Image (cartoon, rainbow, N blue to C red):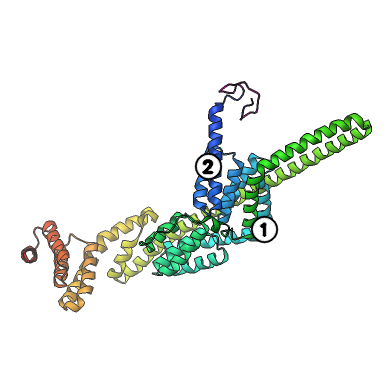
Amino acid sequence: MKCPNCNEEVKRQHVCPFCHIDIDLYKKIKQASKKLYNKGLEQAHSRDLSGAIESLEKSLRFDKKNIQARNLLGLIYYEIGQVGFALKHWILSSNFKKEENLAFYYIKMLQRDKRTLEKQSDAIKKYNQALQAFQQKSEDIAFIQLKSIVVQHPQFLEAHALLALASMMNNEPKRALESIEKILSMDISHPIALRYYQYLQADKIRPVGMKQENLKTQAPRSQYSRTIYQQSKKQERNSWGTFNSIGLFITGAICMLALVYIFIMPSKVKGLQKNIYQLEEEIQQEQQVTSQQIQKYQQQIDQLTKENNELQQTNETLEQEQKRLEERQKIQQITLLLQKNKIEEAAPIIYSIDPSWLESEQEQLRQQWIQDIYPKAARIFYNQGLQAYNQGSTQYEKALNLLNQSLLYAKDQYFSDDALYFIAVIYENTENVQKAISIYETLLEEYPSSNQKYNAQKRLSRLQSS
């Protein structure tokens, strides 16, 4: 028999004497990869795309050179709008197998359809902008971006999922369910969509499978996807039949060539040999051109990756410079406010400074301000808070805010315990009993010698006994 790895003739041995692999283990690994590929193919035909991706990735863990699994995984990634992942697997597939590989066809189709690539790139940019808008709590902007993405790219499942989340955050469950249903119509086991569905429809259980007669209607949405899915399916069904047909054809051709060699004149035999040599040269030239194109395409990808990394580094540098400039501007603003003796306006800006962006001289100046300005600001806010407190319940909210600001800047001043006491009284008068009890206890613990000690104990006892 032959070694399944190096194809050298070996006897009935468990370890190949040429490449030294464990033949039995090698066969088991190959078989496991094929089983997972068949499972992924069946899941893909059933529109269980998430399950298919998981099965195919496991298949490639067993055998990274499983061309059928890698090509199908690329098709599925393309189907759900992940063109970058699709290209990665097709390029790897084309490197592993140079002949009779559909990956070359898929790559050429993408290269010809530059408009689709541009649209996909634009969709990814908008998706990233929508994510940034979410982080900045601009849900309306994110919703508009995502809506335009799913209209132009209805197969972009991640955009549908994010749109569903945006709809739920805007308290629009019907619109969120529409996005979820669109996802599940393309991928029946999409984990995020199923989680959202369970959250919105807690009393319902969505079926995870579909009837076999309905699977035919679940065709890929794009013309390109339909073509490559049909080719994949056709290849799977006819691969062995085609192999046998080719084998019979080659056998018959060899017999015919033998008869021709024996009975036809030597000059004609030489002419046939010349034609064969020419065909072999043409094939080699085509392979060389294809290899050059792949290499050129890889160089373009590497160049784009390099430019993207450089752009990210530039953006990070600009953001750092912007942050450093903002902190320096705060220093200038504080200096101007202190010259005008506007201490209550300067203190919050001092508090907001991020010292990690300051130079040593600026940090020393900030520390000096903390020592000099914070106690003054605390006294100003305390006086203003006490004045608002004395005006009655209509000014309690304002008083509470001012007294808390006083304690933010200083807790060791002679009026700090009074500020904490009046905060507790405000909570007591506004019937926030638990909050009042907590602050009275804090006052007695942190300021045991406070002039408000007796009043705090009296009020605390009354609240605890009631």
Image coordinates of residue 455 in percent, x first then y, are 7, 66
Which stretch did the figure color magenta? 5-17
Number of numbered discs on residues: 2
Q: Is residue 313 left or right of residue 328?
A: right
Quadrant position of residue 223:
bottom right
- What amino acid is at disc 1? Asp
The reply to whether the magenta stretch includes residue 127 is no
Specify the quadrant that holds the N terminus. Answer: top right
- What amino acid is at disc 2? Leu
Q: Is residue 6 visible?
A: yes
Q: Nearer the viewer, residue 347 or 278?
A: 278
Instruction: Give the SS element for disc 1.
Output: loop
Q: Nearer the viewer, residue 368 or 241?
A: 241
Specify the quadrant that holds the C terminus. Answer: bottom left
Q: Nearer the viewer, residue 290 or 6?
A: 6
- Alpha-carbon neighbours of circle 2 within 10 Å: few (<14), some, or many (≥20)? many
Q: Is residue 129 visible?
A: no
Q: Residue 113's mark?
A: 1
Residue 444 position (above or below residue 28): below
Q: Residue at x 57, y 24 (%)?
A: 20
Between marks 1 and 2 in the image, the one whose residue lies nearer the viewer: 2
Image coordinates of residue 72 in percent, x first then y, are 59, 48
Q: Residue at x 40, y 64 (%)?
A: 329
Q: Nearer the viewer, residue 188 or 169?
A: 188
User: Residue beneath label 2, please?
Assistant: 36
Instruction: Give the SS element for disc 2.
Output: helix
Quadrant position of residue 218:
bottom right
- Alpha-carbon neighbours of circle 1 within 10 Å: few (<14), some, or many (≥20)? few
